C-alpha cells in the first residue's frame, strides 16, 4: 500500500507551514521573593539542613513557584533573616485535619545557604513602607521594589 498523491501534498503543505511558523518565545518569569517564618526549634532544623544537604521542607506562600527565592526569618530569640533558598516544587495544600501542617501550603526548598543575620528592627527601619513587617504572619511576598536592596543587605 503506497501513499496517495493527496497524502504527499498534505505532507508537503504541513512541511511548508512548519517552516513558516516561528516558535513563540515566552520570557522567563522573574522570580518572586518570599519571607517565611520559623521558631527557634525550626531555626535549629534549618541550620542542620543547611549543613547536611542544603534542602528542607517548609511552609510556603501559596503563590510560590519553582525558582522563587525564600528568605528564612527565625523569630525568637534571633528575630532575624538567617538564610535563603530556592523553591524546588509548587507548594501543596495540606487538607488533612489529622496532619501537623493542616491548612498550610508546604513545599521543598533547595540551595539553602546562610545569609548575614539581619534583625527585624533593622528591616523595619530600612523598609518602613513594607507594612507586613509590623505584624508578620506565616509568610509574606517581598515587594518587588524592596527585593534588590534587601538581597544586598543580607549579602546575596
Image (spheres, rainbow, N blue to C red):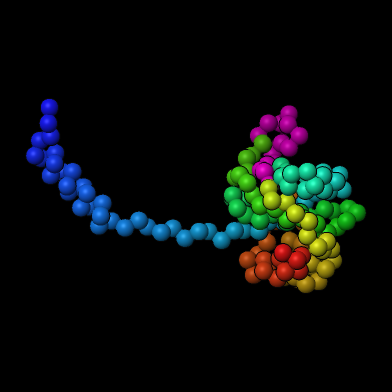
Question: Total of numbered circles in the picture?
Answer: 0
**Horizontal relation, residue 69 to residue 73: left or right:** left
Instruction: Provide the residue span drawn in magenta.
Output: 95-109
In which quadrant is the C terminus drawn? bottom right
Extreme right residue here?
Answer: 77
**107 falls in the magenta region:** yes
Most extreme residue toward the top, as rendered? 1
Dominant SS of magenta comes to loop
Where is residue 19, by image quadrant? bottom left
Q: Is residue 48 visible?
A: yes
Establish if 47 lies above or below 103.
Answer: below
* Rendering coords of residue 102 (x, y %): 71, 36
What residue is at 60 percent from the left and 45 percent from the top?
A: 90
Which quadrant of the structure image shows residue 104? top right
Give above or below for 111 relative to 146.
above
Residue 16 magenta: no
Between 8 and 75, the residue placed more toward the observer is 8
- Quadrant position of the N terminus in the picture: top left
Indicate the position of residue 40 as horizontal and vertical percent values.
87, 48
Residue at point 64% right, 49% down? Answer: 87
- Determine the residue positioned at 67% across, 66% down: 147
Name the spot of residue 16 as percent of width and height, x first: 20, 52
Relative image position of residue 103 (x, y in whole percent): 69, 39
- Left or right: 117 in relation to 3: right
Viewer-closest of 30 and 10: 10
As drawn, 50 above or below 28: above
Q: Is residue 51 or residue 77 the one in the foreground?
A: 51
For the point 63% across and 46% down, the residue is 88
Amino acid at each position: 500500500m503506497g501513499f496517495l498523491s493527496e497524502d504527499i501534498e498534505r505532507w508537503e503543505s504541513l512541511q511548508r507551514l512548519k517552516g513558516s511558523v516561528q516558535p513563540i518565545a515566552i520570557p522567563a518569569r522573574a522570580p518572586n521573593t518570599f519571607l517565611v517564618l520559623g521558631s527557634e526549634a525550626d531555626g535549629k532544623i534549618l541550620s542542620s539542613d543547611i549543613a547536611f544537604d542544603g534542602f528542607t521542607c517548609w511552609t510556603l506562600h501559596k503563590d510560590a513557584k519553582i525558582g522563587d527565592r525564600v528568605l528564612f526569618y527565625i523569630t525568637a530569640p534571633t528575630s532575624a533573616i538567617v538564610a535563603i533558598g530556592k523553591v524546588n516544587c509548587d507548594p501543596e495544600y495540606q487538607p488533612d485535619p489529622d496532619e501537623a501542617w493542616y491548612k498550610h501550603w508546604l513545599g521543598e526548598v533547595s540551595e539553602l545557604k546562610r545569609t548575614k543575620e539581619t534583625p527585624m528592627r533593622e528591616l523595619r527601619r530600612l523598609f518602613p513602607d513594607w507594612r507586613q513587617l509590623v505584624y508578620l504572619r506565616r509568610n509574606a511576598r517581598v515587594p518587588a521594589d524592596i527585593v534588590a536592596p534587601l538581597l544586598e543587605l543580607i549579602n546575596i
